[in-house]
Amino acid sequence: MVSAALCVVCSILVSGAAVGLRGRQDLNKENERKKNILSAAGLIKPGDGADVRKIYDERVKGIIVDLNTGEVVTDDKALFPDPQEYDQKAAADNPKMSMKLDSAQDLAGIKRRENYSWVYLINDENGKLSQYVLPIRGKGLWSTLWGFLALETDLSTVAGLTFYEHGETPGLGGEVDNPKWKSQWIGKEAYQNDFQPDLEVIKGTVNPESPNAIHEVDGLSGATITSRGVTHLLEFWLGDLGFKPYLERVREKEEK
């Protein structure tokens, strides 16, 4: 009876805390998402004490795009009565909001791809569009890596890359979090001249004399599978089933 009573009391306390703190938990998750978007864009650095909410509100605009057509659908009230409520992670698990990928399509190892995705437009201090931040994910060795890829307005030059959630081995695949490794991505070219995806984490170190060096990043020592996973997830999200249709529309609009 004592054990049963103790279990009941503890369950009530834990459940009450979970419900009572849910609002704060959701707010913390939202702030963490904003922080990682700003980090990918190079607008904040770890530990610099920046006002994440203020910088985000001033410099970032989120839009929703149809990954199949590349069209911006944020203002489609039939699809998104309240765009801010769109949960992209939940959509990926919803058969009505996503598509199943066969083995040939599923380079990133995600099994399902949502039909609609957020894209974050980054403005400079003068209010001029300076970057596009794209949410990305894919299978590493032990886990799915969740992150953001930032591109300059030429839609090919990498402005930053960050992974904010994964379960890779610390010191090996977990080095995707290492600022030194992430800094190598800045200035790399995501596409070839014919707008075909071309970013690769190679085995070993990049030869600066190689003609393909602009598309390559040093491999993670002792983490071949994680390195390969990063290459494959970037190939997927920069390709036809990812953000390429949207980026092509942007290019066509700018050319006109």
Image (cartoon, rainbow, N blue to C red):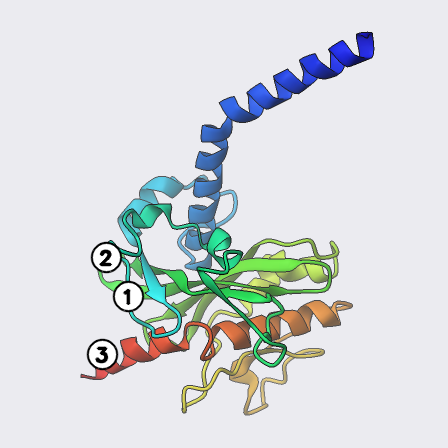
Residue bearing the label numbered 2: 75
The residue that appears at 81% across and 7% down in the rendered structure is 2
**Residue 61 location, x and y as percent?**
29, 54
Q: Which residue of the protein is positioned furthest toward the top in this rendering?
A: 2
**Residue type marked 2:** Asp
**Residue type marked 1:** Val
The residue that appears at 57% across and 21% down in the rendered structure is 17
**Residue 56 location, x and y as percent?**
34, 47
**Of residues 70 and 102, which is closer to you in this image?**
102
Label 1 and label 3: CA atoms lie apart by 15 Å
What secondary structure is found at the residue carrying circle 3? helix
Question: Would residue 219 be found to the left or right of residue 118 on screen?
Answer: right
Q: Answer with mark 3 or mark 2, whichever residue precedes in sequence.
A: 2
Question: Would residue 255 be found to the left or right of residue 43 on screen?
Answer: left
Q: Estimate how packed mark 1 is, as few (under 14), some (14 to 19) or many (20 or more) residues with alpha carbons within 10 Å.
A: some
Label 1 near label 2: C-beta < 8 Å? yes
Label 2 and label 1: CA atoms lie apart by 8 Å
Q: Is 56 rendered above or below residue 238?
A: above
Q: Answer with mark 1 or mark 3, whichever residue precedes in sequence.
A: 1
Residue bearing the label numbered 1: 72
Quarter of the image for residue 112 reads bottom right
**Residue type marked 3:** Glu
Q: Is 24 rendered above or below residue 63?
A: above
Quarter of the image for residue 153 reads bottom left
Residue bearing the label numbered 3: 254
